[in-house]
Amino acid sequence: MIMRRLTRKDHIRQQVIRDWRGVDDPLDLNQNISLAAAHVAEIMRQVGLTEGMEEEKLKQIWQQVAGEFVAKASVPDSLKRGCLTIRVTQPAMRFHLEQMRGSLLAKVQQAAANSMIQSLRFVVG
């Protein structure tokens, strides 16, 4: 912003307005303010939150890897720090999936085509 020197007439005008109002001109409240939305994407990238996968994509991968029967009794719940949590409906299904953890993990990693998923965790619920 280029500051221009006030003329005597402008200075007197500002003084009269200031005296009439009883206060100085209000500060521009929008100056030097930016919306949070302008920074959210960069913050998420810095903390690693953009490295996640879409929920639908995870569900499709799990259904493809686990098969129709197992997919009906389990669903991907979350992906945090490389650990994919699978929520299962019954303890017996959890036990069954625990026995197959290694092969399921390899298949999920292959289907996801990246190394984001480092481990599997099965919870009943």
Image (cartoon, rainbow, N blue to C red):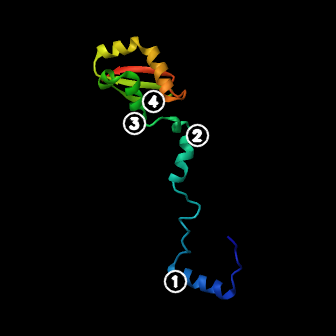
Residue depth check, mark 4 versus mark 3: number of the one nearer the observer: 3
Q: Nearer the viewer, residue 97 or 103?
A: 103
- Label 1, label 3: how far apart the Cα atoms are: 63 Å
Q: Residue at x 47, y 35 (%)?
A: 53
Q: Is residue 108 left or right of residue 17?
A: left
Q: Is residue 58 left or right of residue 92?
A: right
Residue 124 % position (x, y):
32, 20
Residue depth check, mark 3 versus mark 2: number of the one nearer the observer: 3
Residue 88 numbered tag: none
Q: In terms of sequence position, does the residue under pointer 3 or pointer 2 come before the other?
A: 2
Provide the residue designation for mark 3.
Answer: 56
Residue count near mark 3 (Cα–Cα under 10 Å), binned few <14, some 14–19, many ≥20: few
Provide the residue designation for mark 4.
Answer: 79
Q: Is residue 81 above or below residue 19?
A: above
Q: In terms of sequence position, does the residue under pointer 1 or pointer 3 come before the other?
A: 1
Q: In terms of sequence position, does the residue under pointer 2 or pointer 1 come before the other?
A: 1
Give the residue type at disc 3: Glu
- Labelled pair 4, 2 in contact (Cβ < 8 Å): no
